[in-house]
């Protein structure tokens, strides 16, 4: 998976329920993606973005080369955007403390920020899956001739891989036959996003893990992460 910024439950469900999770950072960065932003509730009960400002980059820049614009006080802004949770979220102090711990480090590139955030959160949730960054692995893979071959070729290079899990959104461009011929079972993992209390009458699904942690215990979150199916 590409590295995401405080992603939604489905991303963490993939991390928890797989043996090995690789952040794929050597492809072109797509502007306004989940890599540098995500969604939380705003004070009016709708949703808003929290995001990381980036230094201007060319169209073909790879994810691993995307730099953060630290001239902007983005950490303080995000913490300020979360202040309204204090009124209704039972875990506000815990989550803000976790975020302050994450933000206490200096980050110059988006991959480092996303990686450290993911590792801190899975540690909080008691998840021990290994998270690796593809560009740092020194893994030699075959050239990909189609979008579905990146994951396939990585699996083949790792050896002893018998299953590859992907979110259902990418199912349309995967050729199952390629994976079957390589002895790899291709599965599309879909989490069931059940409602939880968000301090208001209406429920907004698919928000950042930050929102989930604000209102739910570690045990409850883990039950959510295990509530998935293959489609």
Image (cartoon, rainbow, N blue to C red):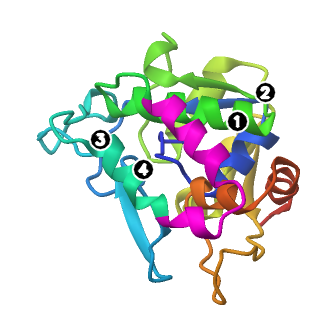
Residue designated by label 1: 122
Residue 13 versus residue 189: which sits nearer the camera? 13
Count of numbered tags? 4
Name the main secondary structure of what is drawn in magenta.
Answer: helix
Residue 134 versus residue 195: which sits nearer the camera? 195
Distance between the Cα atoms at labels 4 and 2? 27 Å
Furthest toward the bottom, the residue is 201
Residue designated by label 3: 28
Q: Residues within 10 Å of mark 4 (few under 14, many from 20)?
A: some
User: What secondary structure is marked by label 4?
Assistant: helix
Badge 1 vs badge 2, beta-carbon distance below 8 Å: yes
172 left or right of 123? left
Q: Residues within 10 Å of mark 1 (few under 14, many from 20)?
A: some
Distance between the Cα atoms at labels 1 and 2? 7 Å
Residue designated by label 4: 79
Foreground disc of the pair 2, 3: 2
Foreground disc of the pair 3, 1: 1
Residue at 52%, 59% in the rendered image: 173
- Closer to the N terminus: mark 2 or mark 3? 3
Distance between the Cα atoms at labels 1 and 4? 20 Å
Distance between the Cα atoms at labels 3 and 1? 27 Å
Asked if 136 appears above or below 168 in the picture, the reply is: above
Badge 4 vs badge 2, beta-carbon distance below 8 Å: no
Q: Which residues are magenta?
A: 84-103
Mark seen at residue 128: 2
- Closer to the N terminus: mark 4 or mark 2? 4
202 is within the stretch colored magenta: no
Residue at 63%, 48% in the rendered image: 93
Which x, y percent locates residue 49?
38, 64
Foreground disc of the pair 4, 2: 4
């Amino acid at each position: 998976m590409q590295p995401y910024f405080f992603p939604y439950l489905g991303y963490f469900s993939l991390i928890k329920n797989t043996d090995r999770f690789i952040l794929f950072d050597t492809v072109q960065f797509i502007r306004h993606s989940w890599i540098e932003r995500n969604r939380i509730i705003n004070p009016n009960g709708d949703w808003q973005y929290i995001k990381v400002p980036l230094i201007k980059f060319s169209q073909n820049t790879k994810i691993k080369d995307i730099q953060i614009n630290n001239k902007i006080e983005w950490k303080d802004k995000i913490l300020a955007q979360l202040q309204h949770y204090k009124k209704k979220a039972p875990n506000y102090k815990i989550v803000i403390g976790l975020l302050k711990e994450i933000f206490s480090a200096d980050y110059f590139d988006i991959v480092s920020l996303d990686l450290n955030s993911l590792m801190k959160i899975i540690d909080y949730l008691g998840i021990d899956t290994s998270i690796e960054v593809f560009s740092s692995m020194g893994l030699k893979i075959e050239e990909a001739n189609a979008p579905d071959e990146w994951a396939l070729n990585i699996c083949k290079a790792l050896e002893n891989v018998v299953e590859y899990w992907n979110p259902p959104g990418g199912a349309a461009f995967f050729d199952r036959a390629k994976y079957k011929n390589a002895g790899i079972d291709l599965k599309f993992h879909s989490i069931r996003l059940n409602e939880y209390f968000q301090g208001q009458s209406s429920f907004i699904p698919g928000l950042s893990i930050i929102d989930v942690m604000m209102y739910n215990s570690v045990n409850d979150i883990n039950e959510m992460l295990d509530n998935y199916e293959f489609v």
